Amino acid sequence: MQRIVTLVAGRTLFWLAIAFFVIVCAFPFYWMVIVSLKENSDLYNVTNIPFWFTEPPTLEHFRYLFEQTLFGRWLLNSLIIGVCVTAITLVTAVPAGYSLARMTGRAGETLGIGIFLTYLVPPSLLFLPLSRIVADLGLQNSMWSLVLVYPTFTIPFSTWLLMGFFKAMPPEIEEAAIVDGCSLFGAFVRMTIPLSVPAILTAVIFTFTLTLQEFVYALTFVSSSAQKPVTLGVVTDLIRGDVFYWGELMGGALIASVPVGIAYNIFLDRFIAGITGGAVK
Amino acid sequence: MVSIAEPIAKPASRFRFILDRRDVLGAIFMAPAILYVLLLVGLPFLLAMYYSVSAYTLYNPTWRFVGLANFVDVVNNPTFLRTLGNTFLFTFASNFLGLVMGKFGAFLLLQPFPGRKIVRALVILPWAVPIALATIAWEWIFDSLYSVVNWTLIALGIVTRPEAPNWLGTPELAMLCIIIINAWRFFPFAIVIFLAGITAVPQDIIDAATVDGAGFWRRNYQIIVPMILPIVAIGLIFGIVFTFTDLSIVFLLTNGGPAGATSVLGFQGFQVGIASGDVAHGAAISLFMLPVLLIVVIAMLRFIRRREI
């Protein structure tokens, strides 16, 4: 009897702890869903229960978001920025990661750590000089400034990630190709790249999500509404003076959050393998 | 795959020769990444250093050298000392909280239970989602009038509406809010790091310890924790760097207020350097992050090296 009581108490505590974590993590997102679907008269009535609908739910906020604001444009901007930054990152980081894993030996190790450390140089230290550089290049107030600047953190990040993957690949595959007459370069292009498509895809996903998460550079360089990426547009343009468009804010935040949340979950295990692979060798 | 079987005709050109030298090709492969980083991280970094000893403003872009005058101005400003204190409090409190919750969460997620995958997916969300967007949700949760936290407290009869706390309008509570939000954002990453570390500990070591009579706590704190320490340390270093230099939570949630109570270094640098256009003083403020960053970088190098041995 004593044992059963302890067991039941233990299971209950366990599930309570799980419930606590899930509520803490997911509540703000549940909140976005509820608020973005509520009538304003329901939302701004403190006597109504906030956790559920007192009046029937409405799509009014989403309609406003797409018809009366530049939300669609911001989504498109984010997509363009993400695709361009990812392209720049791949072209530079795939060879760099491979070089660090295979070709540069001892010096490469130091170089690799150096590249990685630049990932730790924060935007809040660089935004002042970079805003001057962006202005000198005539890119101020344009989303192309972000295409130029975002690779400063996506290249170090992806190089490190890819280096971890390349180190984990058996070198015999390329050696066999070289023995069969491929050049070193040929072995990289014909053997390594096709075999590391999953790793490259992981780098693509995380590069893309890093561009979506960035806020400081976007805030500093871009002020005209039509050029903003979605993260910046939602949090700056849906607040007019003291008026917060809460339903639209939550709806916009929700739409922009969902794809990132899903992508992280799908690629999390590969991400861990890459990060720790780079650290462990 | 066909290319393996059929020997490719070798054009004996000079170009081909270069592509076959491992060190040359290695350098060529590295060059674009290094150039990009040097031009857009290294150069701006030096420029930031120069701004901090010049009289450069947005309205009067001069390169006149003023020595350490900007730093003296900054340090003599009492608001700045408060900002510096806030930054340390914000960083260490939220990382400590995040780490404790991360350890606890990882311990829970290691147990097998039905629905574990879904729970993990939900727990990852705060780390994945853009922090600017999540902060907006938190701003509504802590709203002065429509706060759902206050609604719940009132419904449970803990407080009455007139005495309900104004979360973002009271200095101590506003600080607590930004700490909680940052810990909330950081702890899923801590869970991921702990899980990666713990699952990498070989099971036979744990079994051997169990056979030798080690109980749950000893296994946990004398075997697992020391073994995963390097990877946890690297995770923590990330947490510290990104929190210490962050400005988005403060910018969106409290705008440094009330009355400077939540102003942090990154935010202050932005306000002075971009919003007020006083680039020189803004750069000087931002550069106060550098000593902490350097300490962290040295710690990181030591951990990486120790891991390699």
Image (cartoon, coloured by chain):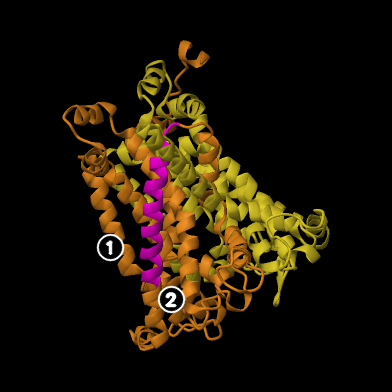
Residue lying at 57% horizontally and 50% vertically, measured from the top left: A26
Q: CA distance from mark 1 to mark 2?
A: 20 Å
Chain letter matching colour yellow? A
Residue lying at 44% horizontally and 20% vertically, measured from the top left: B10
* Majority SS type along the magenta span: helix
Query: Disc 2 sits on a residue from what chain?
Result: B
Q: Residue B94 lies in what quarter of the image?
A: bottom left
Whether labels 1 and 2 belong to a single chain: the reply is: yes
Circle 1 sits in a helix, a strand or a loop, which is it?
helix
Chain letter matching colour orange? B
Q: Which residue is mark 1?
A: B295
Q: Residue A170 lies in what quarter of the image?
A: top left
Q: Is residue A34 left or right of residue B160?
A: right
Q: Which residue is mark 2?
A: B283
> Which one is earlier in the sequence, the residue at label 1 or at label 2?
2
Q: Is residue A261 left or right of residue A18?
A: right
Q: What residue occupies the far top of the structure in this picture? A: B5
Q: Is residue B263 above or below residue A191?
A: below
Q: Is residue B15 magenta?
A: no
Please say whether residue A100 is visible from this viewpoint: no
Residue lying at 69% horizontally and 52% vertically, measured from the top left: A33
Q: Is residue B200 above or below residue B58?
A: above
| Residue type at numbered disc 2 | Ala
Badge 2 crowding class, 10 Å Cα cut-off, few under 14, some 14 to 19, many 20 or more, is many
Q: Which residues are magenta?
A: B87-112
Which of the two residues, A62 or B144, is positioned nearer the viewer here? B144
Q: Residue A235 lies in what quarter of the image?
A: bottom right
